[in-house]
């Protein structure tokens, strides 16, 4: 069976990570991995709940070296973990907290070594990992329904990370220290803030900042060149702030549609190129574009796209088998395409088609709208035409203001009615609003209107 070294060949002293502003060499990282691997109990599954990205990486690579599958759930809510434990009775939890989060699950603290088991000063052997070894089970975000699990293998995740490194380092001018504002347990954060630096020759960083001031502070801790891995939600907060932005070599965005206006403003504020990534939990990343320079997406070098009866299929590269995309695509060539919207986002009202993602982009870019979401309510009367509804945070606006702004861009059938003003919209750390949150809003505010 083909195997690969757990990390690409490099000098042992090469800096592979920064714990805050402190550099960690490749050999010290491998010592941490080796020491933890020796402490792991016999099991086939671990649940990694580290809050620190460095310790998450140590736990992940220790599990990989032992042939253990790491389960990365969409949520760490007690009921979700209880359901997962019922499905996987041999689950062992790895974390960087001092005490177990879930007493019913065996726990190993990864961030300290028990007495007499501290990492050795000897050079550790480099584990070789089978190409097809199953290393992680990741879950979809839940933004379009119940999260679904997907198993990923070592060799194919490595291939994807190297393809991303080729694109990103070319754009940034070289390998970077990578700071992510996104959760590293989810596919985008795992690929771009953990595997990209470790497999691609960059440097992993510890922190996962959320607020603009914290993002800037975390960037300033790192040496240049620096890459910021983030989302449109975080970018909007950053570029709209009055805080001076530090120098970065590049910015990577995903998880939601990015407007050209926000992309241009981001590049002006940071004086750096912004790259947008296209992918999904099912496929991993498969294409990129620089939205200020091109509308079309360019697939990774070994990825090919084709269409059959309106369905777009991706194959090659890191994909184990052909994958049907859950997106509406205008295919320009086997390697270039325009993205029209997700299949689940497309709506048809009175014979007219649009995308909820497009409508939400318009809504959240209205001056005075702090946040908002447009959805299709599930409860309407038999005599009422199904049409969008909106939940909006906009203390200074009236419904008429929002409708007037939207009317400039969309047909009347897509104007949301009603518009419900709320004080809070729950988004996850990727900036997404889960389908369950939207369903709760509909049940609370619109059921009685049906």
Image (cartoon, grey):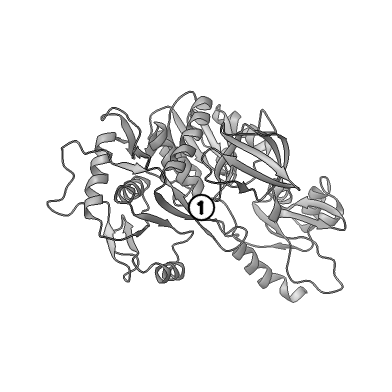
Q: Quadrant of the N terminus?
A: top left
Residue furthest left as drawn: 116
Residue 109 rendering spot, x and y as whole percentages = 27, 57
Residue 56 rendering spot, x and y as whole percentages = 36, 49
Q: Quadrant of the C terminus?
A: bottom right
Question: Hey, which quadrant is residue 392 in on the image?
Answer: bottom right
Residue 203 rendering spot, x and y as whole percentages = 38, 34
**73 in relation to 205, above or below:** below
Which residue shows up at 84% across the image and 74% down it? 382
* Residue bearing the label numbered 1: 429
Residue closest to the eye, 286 or 133: 133
The reply, left or right, for residue 390 in relation to residue 158 is right
Residue 310 rendering spot, x and y as whole percentages = 75, 47
The reply, left or right, for residue 241 in relation to residue 194 is right
Which residue shows up at 21% across the image and 39% down it? 124
SS for dot 1: loop
Residue closest to the eye, 227 or 333: 333
Which residue shows up at 44% across the image and 62% down it? 76
The reply, left or right, for residue 322 in relation to residue 204 is right
């Amino acid at each position: 069976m083909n195997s690969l070294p757990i990390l690409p060949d490099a000098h042992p002293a090469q800096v592979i990570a920064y714990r805050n502003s402190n550099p960690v060499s490749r050999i010290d990282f491998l010592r941490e991995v080796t020491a933890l691997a020796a402490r792991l109990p016999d099991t086939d599954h671990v649940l990694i709940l580290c809050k620190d990205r460095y310790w998450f990486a140590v736990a992940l690579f220790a599990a990989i070296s032992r042939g253990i599958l790491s389960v990365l759930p969409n949520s760490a809510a007690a009921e979700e973990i209880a359901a997962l434990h019922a499905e996987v009775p041999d689950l062992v939890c790895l974390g960087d907290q001092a005490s177990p989060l879930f007493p019913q699950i065996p726990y190993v603290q990864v961030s300290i070594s028990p007495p007499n088991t501290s990492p050795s000063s000897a050079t550790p052997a480099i584990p070789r990992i089978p190409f097809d070894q199953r290393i992680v089970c990741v879950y979809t975000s839940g933004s379009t329904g119940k999260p679904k699990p997907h198993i990923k293998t070592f060799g194919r995740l490595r291939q994807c990370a190297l393809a991303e490194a080729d694109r990103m380092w070319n754009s940034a001018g070289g390998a970077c220290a990578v700071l992510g504002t996104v959760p590293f347990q989810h596919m985008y954060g795992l690929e771009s803030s953990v595997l990209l630096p470790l497999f691609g020759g960059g440097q992993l960083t510890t922190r996962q900042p959320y607020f603009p001031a914290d993002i800037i502070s975390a960037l300033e801790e790192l040496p240049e060149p620096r890459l910021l891995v983030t989302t449109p939600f975080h970018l909007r907060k950053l570029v709209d702030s009055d805080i001076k932005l530090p120098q970065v070599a590049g910015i990577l965005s995903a998880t939601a549609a990015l407007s050209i206006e926000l992309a241009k403003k981001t590049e002006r504020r940071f004086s750096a190129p912004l790259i947008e990534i296209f992918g999904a939990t099912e496929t991993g990343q498969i294409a990129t574009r620089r939205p200020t320079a091109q509308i079309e997406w360019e697939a990774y070098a070994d990825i090919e796209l084709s269409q059959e009866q309106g369905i777009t299929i991706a194959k090659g590269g890191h994909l184990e088998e052909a994958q049907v995309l859950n997106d509406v695509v205008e295919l320009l060539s086997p390697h270039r395409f325009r993205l029209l919207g997700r299949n689940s986002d497309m709506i048809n009202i009175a014979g007219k088609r649009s995308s909820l993602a497009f409508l939400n982009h318009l809504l959240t870019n209205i001056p005075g709208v702090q946040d908002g979401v447009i959805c299709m309510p599930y409860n309407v009367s038999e005599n009422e035409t199904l049409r969008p509804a909106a939940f909006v945070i906009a203390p200074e606006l009236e419904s008429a203001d929002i409708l007037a702004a939207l009317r400039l861009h969309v047909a009347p059938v897509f104007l949301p009615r009603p518009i419900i003003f709320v004080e809070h919209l729950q988004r996850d750390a990727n900036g997404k609003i889960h389908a369950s949150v939207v369903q709760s809003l509909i049940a609370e505010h619109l059921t009685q209107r049906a």
